[in-house]
Amino acid sequence: MNESPSSRNSRWQIETCWCSGRDDLRFCKSGAAKMIRSKKLTSGLLAGSLVFVSLYALNTFLSPTVSGSVHVSAGNTGRNLEYVREVLASSEAPASTAAAVPEASLQQLLGCVDGVATARYGQRGEFWVLYNYVRAERQPGCADSVTYTTHGDHTFLDNLVPLLKRWQGPVAMSVFAPGADWTPALAAIQHVRHCGPSAHLVRQHVTFHFYFPAKHVPKTVPRPAVDGFSHLPKANCSLSLEQAAGLGQVSYKSTHKILYPVNVGRNVAREEALTHFVLASDVELYPNPGVIPDFLGMVHGHLLQQQKANVTKKPSPPKVYPLSIFEVKENSSMPQNKTQLAAMLASKDAVPFHKHVCPNCHNVPKAAEWMALKQSEGLHVFHVGQRTGRFLHWEPIYIGTKQEPPYDERLSWEGMSDKMTQVIILCKYLKDEIFETTRS
């Protein structure tokens, strides 16, 4: 292992190097990992500095005696002031300096820093993880969007296109690919990235991470190329996605009776998101269209109100924003808005999520009152709820940040309680226009 030249930068994170002189990865024993740093950006401070400098310069020009070191003759002063007054009068500048200062951006209010997705690999307990192995063409700024973080194996990739048609934003997906499942997983990913009229959505928005047990490493793992794409196999668009993914064959995971480590995938996808806000969800759950701009607009407006009110009280506890979830019949169209959803619930074409499997898991506070509210413009807080009382077993899927408690990686999908230990001691802000749907 050769030391990375980036080891002299500034923010700590765990990374390992590619084995030198090879085109594939060699998964060495633990101890090969080392600490490296990456530089932080300070663009959020730059705009404020420029505003201050320009205002100070103008003030100095209009008040030539502002400093004892500035001396201007009386004649020049008069001509200078006259000129400035003419320029200001002929321009469309606002009457007051305060009105000319632009309102703070969402990034400035959040204090978040833009990042870059880089390919690397490392050990995570008993698993190897290939972070950012297939990167999206678009990499959003930290306050530009909300990342939908999810997980699955190659049999779940058919959900990406219908999800993206509604989400229209970044997706981070952890793909479980032990042993021989690696090959069909890559083939399926290339198929959804290059085949079909909506493949561009996958290329633009979806970043794929891979993970597998240390005891079930694929035979060959190509080293990721610098461009993030050329190490991948060519897509065979003459095949269907089902054929490319080998869905008619028994998987390596099934043959070797490997449990699905769902929470490893959840945590990896969430941690690697480039945006401040994330929606950690299952890939079969499709949000209603327009969630991203509505949510960011709501948060930005709320933070601006706090700033203008000059709030000095102690910060309130962290909050997350849960979504109501529903199932629709397999042959039914997905509802586009709350009005359509209400009609489908009335006709029994939709039901609350897991109503017949685990009703308490998705028993949302004030669900009936939320449904009774008519659809409105924009996004608003409907109710502040807690995971207490008869909602103690509520497993909310929510928009939050990467700072929320991680999922317990000791639990598996097969155990059916993979989210129970994530007891979130937070307020939950229920939204009045956001929901997710899945097919029964």
Image: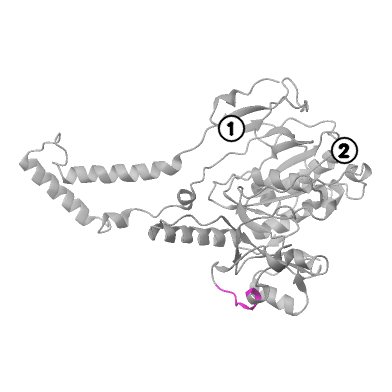
Quadrant holding the N terminus: top right
* Residue 236 seen anywhere in this rendered image of the structure: no
Is residue 371 on the magenta stretch? yes
On the image, the x and y values in percent for residue 193 come to 72, 47
Question: Is disc 2 surrounded by few (<14), some (14 to 19) or many (20+) residues within 10 Å?
Answer: some
Segment colored magenta? 370-376
Residue at 84% x, 52% y: name it.
415
- At horizontal 14% and vertical 42% (from top left) the residue drawn is 64
Horizontal and vertical percent position of residue 394: 72, 63
Please check the rendered image and state whether residue 345 is part of the magenta-colored stretch, yes or no.
no
Question: Whole-percent x and y of residue 277?
Answer: 59, 52
Which mark is drawn over residue 12?
1
Give SS at disc 1.
strand
Do we see residue 317 in this rendering?
Answer: yes
Quadrant assignment, res 392: bottom right
Q: Considering depth in this image, is 154 or 13 the residue closer to the camera? A: 13
Residue 336 picture quarter: bottom right
The residue at 85%/31% (across/down) is: 219
Q: Give left or right: position of 39 versus 231.
A: left
Identified by mark 1, the residue type is Trp
Disc 1: CA contacts within 10 A as few (<14), some (14-19) or many (>=20): few
Residue nearer the viewer, 342 or 258: 258
Q: Mark 2 against mark 1, which lies toward the viewer?
A: 1
Q: Along the polypeptide, which appears first: circle 2 or circle 1?
A: 1
Q: How many labels does the image show?
A: 2
Name the mark on residue 180: 2
Q: Which mark is residue 383?
A: none
Q: Is residue 15 above or below residue 424?
A: above
Q: Which amino acid does label 2 sit on?
A: Ala
| 84 displayed left or right of 192 | left
